Image: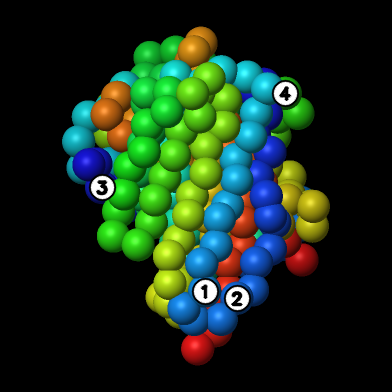
């Protein structure tokens, strides 16, 4: 199993602050995905990064895939209470279609 | 993206009983997956359900405990058998079309 280490596990910040979540592995992934999950719902895909060094932006969210395709980061600028949720990184390995998930980062943004 | 209807959304069950969770997809998909998630924690893959063949189980999960059916390309069930309080968790199904992954809204199971 290709393990994904995600940090921090918990993050509580005030509205307007910036934050970065990290997803690291010793394994190479063909792609990495970031999901956000709210209570009572399944994870919802935010972005997929495929190319080493790739940077993708989704409004105030910036996603980066490491050059070696072993790590990724999610940066949120000027966080808002609506960003509150569980953020999960997941990797699709080279040998199968099932996703391996990181442990998740529980983000709380207070007004 | 595919749309998944997962039922039930939650249930409270007596220990020793079994619960079957259903996932219906609005399109034909080859790969379906079943995950378990402790509240506030990440997802752990239980098994991959392929139509026309036996499900493939991950380490720590066995068919006798978590039998899976996949009668066609749009439907699958996961049964949690002979339940104990340790089985209390959220169970989710997922599908991929190759381009992306979609998840059901989950079944929150409490075993008392």
Tell me which residue sits at (61%, 63%) in the image.
A106
Coloring scheme used: rainbow
Dot 4 corresponds to which residue?
A: B59
* SS label for mark 4: loop
Residue B86 image offset from top left, x and y in percent: 79, 52
Between circles 2 and 3, the one closer to the viewer is 2
> Which of these two is toward me, B23 or A85?
A85
The residue where tag 3 is placed is B3
Q: Quadrant of residue B75?
A: top left
- Residue at 68% of width from left, 55% of height from top? A8
Chain bearing mark 2: A
The dot on residue A99 is none
Reading the image, the residue beneath label 1 is A17
Asked which secondary structure carries label 3, the reply is: loop
Chain for disc number 4: B
Between circles 2 and 4, the one closer to the viewer is: 2
How far apart marks 2 and 3 lie (CA) works out to 33 Å
**Are dots 2 and 4 in contact, CB under 8 Å?**
no
**Labels 1, 3: front one:** 1
Residue B103 appears anywhere in the view: no
Mark 2 vs 1: CB contact within 8 A: yes
Q: Secondary structure at mark 2?
A: strand
The subunit carrying tag 1 is A
Q: Give the mark toward the camera: 1 or 4.
A: 1
Q: CA distance from mark 1 to mark 4?
A: 41 Å
Which of the two labelled residues, at mark 4 and mark 3, occupies the earlier sequence position? 3
Rendered view: A18 above or below A13: above
Q: Local crowd at mark 3 within 10 Å, few (<14), some, or many (≥20)?
A: some
């Amino acid at each position: 199993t290709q393990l994904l280490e995600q940090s921090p596990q918990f993050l509580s910040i005030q509205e307007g602050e910036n934050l970065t979540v990290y997803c690291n592995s010793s394994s190479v992934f063909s792609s990495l995905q970031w999901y956000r999950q709210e209570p009572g719902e399944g994870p919802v895909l935010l972005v997929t990064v495929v190319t080493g060094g790739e940077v993708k932006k989704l409004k105030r969210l910036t996603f980066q895939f490491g050059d070696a395709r072993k790590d990724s980061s999610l940066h949120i600028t000027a966080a808002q209470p609506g960003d509150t949720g569980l953020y999960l990184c997941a990797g699709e390995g080279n040998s199968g279609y099932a996703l391996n998930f990181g442990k998740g980062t529980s983000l709380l943004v207070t007004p | 993206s595919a749309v998944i209807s997962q039922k039930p959304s939650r249930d409270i069950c007596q220990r020793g009983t079994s619960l079957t969770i259903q996932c219906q997809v609005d399109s034909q998909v080859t790969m379906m997956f079943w995950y378990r998630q402790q509240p506030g924690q990440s997802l752990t893959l239980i098994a991959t359900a392929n139509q026309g063949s036996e499900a493939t189980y991950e380490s720590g999960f066995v068919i006798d405990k978590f039998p899976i059916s996949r009668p066609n390309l749009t439907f699958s069930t996961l049964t949690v058998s002979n339940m104990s309080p340790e089985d209390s968790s959220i169970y989710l199904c997922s599908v991929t079309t190759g381009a992306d992954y979609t998840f059901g809204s989950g079944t929150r199971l409490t075993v008392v």
